[in-house]
Image: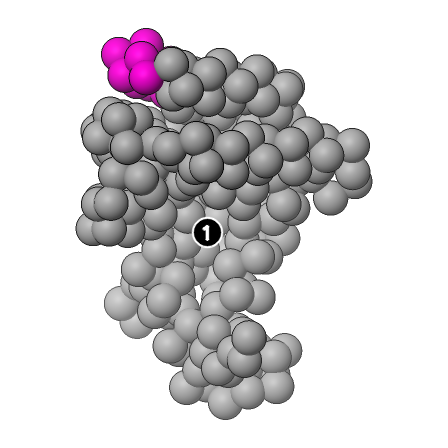
Amino acid sequence: MHKTRTQFVADAIRTKILRGEIKGGSALRQDALAKEFDVSRIPVREALLTLEAEGLVEFEAHKGAYATELSAPKILELFELRVLLECHILAAAIPRLTKEKLDAAEELLIQLDHLLDTSSQIDHWSDHNFAFHRALYDAAEKPETMALITQLNTQSDRYIRIHLLHAAGVHKAEAEHRELLELCRRGDISAACDLLRRHILVAADDIVALLHQQQQQGC
């Protein structure tokens, strides 16, 4: 798919932030970025505005753009919002999940299992993780809710990557995904939503603990 210069720059900066190559609090100099990506300052400015809307970049008056800082309160707020919206949409989706949709979600889990055996699991696992959840949620046919959930997951992505890099989060999530899919097949809305709530909130607690540990170690 053809990308505009703005999309290209936004994708490149987003990837650097999510991988941790650009640390929270780092200045994003438009002149330097324009030179790095061989574009004018206009697509760089537009790309930074796109990333600001995603919560990955913030602008300070008279100082310019910065990658947003990692923050325990922000982690908890983002994941609490995810619980509210994702449990709501899952409850609406379960009665409408056909065998075909459930089988498609299971195929995504198989792909996730395959990624666990590859060196690129961190780069791609979070994308496939969201694709699995989306495969369940889309049946609700709530596009505005889904748009908000997508934005929250984008803002949560770098925190999820911290979890994957420093804890056994992947293997735990995989087991919970299998259980969630089975509950959806059985049409057990209450149990599925309870599991999803724990799935999200326990991950948040793990990430906050890791962040505190890193801060104490001066990382």
Name the chief secondary structure element in magenta: helix
Question: Which image quadrant for residue 78?
Answer: top left
Front position in the image: 63 or 182: 182
Q: What are the residue bounds of the magenta stretch? A: 187-197
Measuring 51% from the left and 38% from the top, which residue is drawn there? 104
Q: Answer left or right for 183 relative to 107.
A: left
Q: Is residue 177 above or below residue 14?
A: above
User: Residue 114's x, y, as percent?
Assistant: 72, 34
Q: Is residue 126 above or below residue 168?
A: below
Does the stretch in magenta take in 192?
A: yes
Can residue 30 be seen here? The reply is no
Residue type at the position of mark 1: Gly
Tell me the quadrant of the picture where the C terminus can be found. Answer: top right
The residue beneath circle 1 is: 25
Front position in the image: 9 or 103: 103
User: Residue 27's x, y, as percent?
Assistant: 48, 62
Q: Secondary structure at mark 1?
A: loop
Say few, some or many: other residues with alpha carbon within 10 Å of mark 1 (under 14 / 14 to 19 / 20 or more). Answer: some
Front position in the image: 172 or 140: 140
Question: Which image quadrant for residue 165?
Answer: top right
User: Residue 47's x, y, as percent?
Assistant: 42, 72
Tell me the quadrant of the picture where the N terminus can be found. Answer: bottom right
Measuring 26% from the left and 26% from the top, which residue is drawn there? 95
Q: Is residue 7 above or below residue 123?
A: below
Does the stretch in magenta take in 35?
A: no
Measuring 35% from the left and 47% from the top, which residue is drawn there? 150
